[in-house]
């Protein structure tokens, strides 16, 4: 097989890896790869930066997805073409339930599909549900690390401002159909907003692949609209630590 067009990777380069850690930000890939043994860069093109490393002798990829469903779908589809079967998203998020505090982690069990890209893989009635083993590994890992975490449903949008009912945008308003949407998701016990899990979980479930998602909380929208950049680093390192341990648990069960 030739190099995949977007990721610039071929099966030989990934050395049989079956598991990929997926941050959104290409700049975070190196940080995550530093948690692995023998981490090294494989390729970088547009938003897709890829590194390969090892955990207890098992090859693990770290590949950035970029922001949102379309670039995530390209990343996951091409990795699957290369033989990757398990995906763990490492993200950031805005909480919408009052008891969640910036710095906490959220393990997504399923996502409300407010994205468009996932609909090209399965109709919207199809559940964007996380893989049970990966979700369990994420929870087990968060407990091992002693990190405060919440487990539940995420709303996954295509847009940061309109889709997440933010009024601090250029337009300063949202279309009528989105007015009151945050309140409705709160009432339906949704924990948080982010922008990739809907596509990731739906496409993976639909294609018989395994995926899970853990996100670090940057802001609680019940109290504050603006993200405090000073907490970004500590939230990210907690999320990465938990996700890497979960990848190790999943990898150890592979033949
Ligand atoms: N990512 C999102 O999509 N929303 C937030 O509020 C924070 C991070």
Image (cartoon, rainbow, N blue to C red):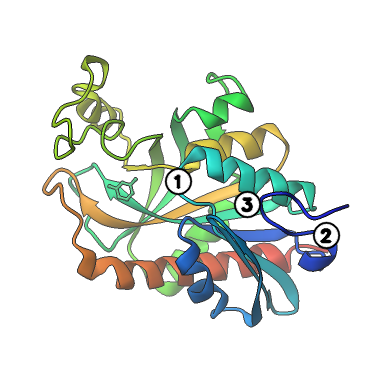
Mark 2, other Cα within 10 Å: few <14 / some 14–19 / many ≥20: some
Residue 127 appearing in the image: no
Q: Residue at x 74, y 47 (%)?
A: 80
Residue 169: image quadrant is: top left
Q: Which numbered dot is residue 35?
A: none
Q: Residue at x 60, y 46 (%)?
A: 132
Which structural element holds mark 2?
A: helix
Query: Can you say whether 89 is above or below 180 in the image?
Result: below
Mark 2 beta carbon near ligand 1 (under 8 Å)? no
Between disc 3 and disc 1, the foreground one is 1
Q: Which numbered dot is residue 133?
A: 3
The span from disc 1 to disc 2 (Cα, nearest Å) is 30 Å
Between disc 1 and disc 2, the foreground one is 2
Which structural element holds mark 3?
A: helix
Q: Nearer the viewer, residue 172 or 201?
A: 172
Q: Which numbered dot is residue 108?
A: 1
In this picture, residue 104 sits left or right of residue 213: left
Q: Residue at x 26, y 37 (%)?
A: 161
**Residue 203, x across and y down, in percent:** 62, 35
Q: Which numbered dot is residue 11?
A: 2
**Residue 48, x across and y down, in percent:** 58, 57
Quadrant of the frame with the C terminus: bottom right
Residue 39: image quadrant is: bottom right
Query: Can you say whether 227 is above or below 189 in the image?
Result: below
């Amino acid at each position: 097989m030739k190099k995949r067009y977007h990721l610039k990777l071929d099966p030989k380069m990934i050395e049989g890896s079956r598991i990929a850690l997926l941050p959104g930000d290409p700049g975070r890939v190196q940080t995550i790869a530093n948690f692995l043994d023998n981490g090294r860069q494989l390729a970088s093109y547009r938003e897709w930066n890829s590194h390969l490393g090892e955990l207890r002798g098992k090859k693990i990829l770290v590949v950035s997805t970029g922001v949102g469903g379309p670039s995530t779908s390209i990343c996951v589809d091409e990795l699957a073409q290369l033989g990757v079967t398990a995906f763990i998203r490492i993200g950031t998020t805005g909480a919408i339930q009052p008891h969640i505090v910036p710095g906490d982690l959220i393990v997504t069990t399923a996502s409300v599909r407010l994205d468009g890209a996932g609909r090209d893989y399965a109709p919207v009635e199809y559940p964007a549900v996380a893989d049970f083993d990966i979700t369990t590994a994420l929870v087990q890992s968060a407990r091992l690390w002693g990190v405060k975490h919440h487990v539940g449903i995420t709303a996954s949008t295509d847009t940061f401002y309109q889709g997440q009912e933010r009024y601090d945008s250029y337009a300063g308003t949202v279309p009528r159909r989105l007015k009151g949407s945050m309140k409705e998701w709160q009432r339906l016990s949704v924990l948080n907003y982010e922008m990739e899990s809907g596509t990731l979980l739906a496409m993976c479930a639909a294609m018989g692949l395994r995926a899970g998602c853990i996100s670090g909380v940057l802001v609680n929208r019940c109290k504050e609209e603006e993200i405090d950049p000073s907490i970004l680093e500590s939230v990210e390192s907690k999320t990465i630590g938990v996700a890497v341990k979960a990848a190790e648990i999943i990898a150890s069960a592979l033949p």
